[in-house]
Amino acid sequence: MNGTLEKEENKTGPCRLNVGTDEGQHSNGDSNSENELKELISEEAFFRLKESGTGLHLKSVDELIQMAYGYYNEIALPKLVTDFGSLELSPVNGRTLTDFMHLRGLHMHSLGRVVELAEKLPHIQSLCIHEMVTRAFKHIVKAVIASVENVADLSAAVGLELVPRDYDMECPNPFRKFDIISMVPVCKHVGCSSAGRNLLESSKISLDKGQLEDAVNYGTKALAKMIAVCGPYHRTTASAYSLLAVVLYHTGDFNQICEPCFVPSSFYLWTLHSNTAATYINVAMMEEGMGNVHVALDFCMKL
């Protein structure tokens, strides 16, 4: 009997020891991951991450990088295309497409992936392909202009509008003086603050979750920040106005919609600008949704 107990103890002893060893190894791994992460971010940021309850502070740097890649490719990009399809976002040209992607932290080199995901949105595919071709051509033109004397110096100070024709880019001097149609001064635009962009994104997230009160609150704060930093008639201020108009539409506060929609587009841009046209279309859709068909037609007739 004693011999049997001794055998059982011998059998269970190593098992218990293995469990303790595994737990110790797991604990050491978590500790190493925490120490590695603490070296890369501030103590305050690490504490916030730990208190979030997600367990991300226990992940290694390599694991976090893989998770970030996974989120970018499997969630962020498909969500962008979904919002295009639902008209939550309505890019009308390369500039608005770029603004929407940058606002969500998406790189423009992901345009090819957006084309693949937008198989049921041919207008988005066309816009992305056009933007890819334009960006590729821009790099070629910049390289050629930089290699040409005089014109290179001029192009650093002004924007050159060239005659649309086929240029021999392998020629030493592909551009001539009479190829220049007009010159536009290059101006430094005021960049939007990161706080303003974060507030805009928070407003969009709250809207997606149906938290309309928070969406209005964040949207109003974002608009105030944009006006303070960029002025009332800046492009980023226009995007804040447009988002606030969408939020107000969902809250049913229709009386305040029109002014936020048209103020930035009418003054910062111009009446026939594509962004202004998109604003008219959005307001027409809102009016049609409220049953004001004749008012919606009036907005469409202004295009």
Image (cartoon, helix red, strand yellow):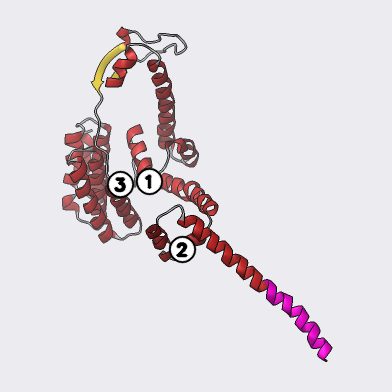
Classify 242 as above or below 128.
below
- Specify few, some or many for label 2: CA neighbours under 10 Å numbering under 14, 14-19, or 20 or more: few
Task: Using residue 67 as the reference point, say whether residue 280 is left or right of it.
Answer: left
Counting residues from the start of the chain, the first of labels 1 and 3 encountered is 1
Judge depth for marks 1 and 3 and give the one in front.
3
Determine if the magenta segment contains residue 10: yes
Residue 173 pos. (x, y %): 40, 8
Classify 218 as above or below 106.
below
Estimate the spatial distance between the alpha carbons at disc 1 and disc 3, rounded to whole Å: 12 Å
Q: Are the two marked residues, 1 and 3, in contact with CB atoms closer than 8 angstroms?
A: no
Judge depth for marks 2 and 1 and give the one in front.
2
Image point (50%, 60%), residue name = 34
Q: Amino acid at mark 2?
A: Thr
Classify 246 as above or below 234.
below
Task: Please state which of residues 3 and 127 is positioned toward the viewer in this rendering.
Answer: 3
Counting residues from the start of the chain, the first of labels 2 and 1 encountered is 2
Estimate the spatial distance between the alpha carbons at disc 2 and disc 1, rounded to whole Å: 22 Å
Task: Using residue 132 as the reference point, say whether residue 287 is left or right of it.
Answer: left
**In this figure, which residue is indicated by the disc labeled 2?**
54
**In this figure, which residue is indicated by the disc labeled 3?**
194
Image point (50%, 48%), residue name = 69
Estimate the spatial distance between the alpha carbons at disc 3 and disc 2, rounded to whole Å: 25 Å
* SS under mark 1: loop
Q: Amino acid at mark 3?
A: Ser
- Specify few, some or many for label 1: CA neighbours under 10 Å numbering under 14, 14-19, or 20 or more: some
Counting residues from the start of the chain, the first of labels 3 and 2 encountered is 2
Q: Taking the image as drawn, is residue 284 in sight?
A: no
**In this figure, which residue is indicated by the disc labeled 1?**
104
Q: Taking the image as drawn, is residue 244 in sight?
A: yes
Which stretch appears magenta? 1-18
Determine if the magenta segment contains residue 145: no
Residue 293 pos. (x, y %): 22, 45
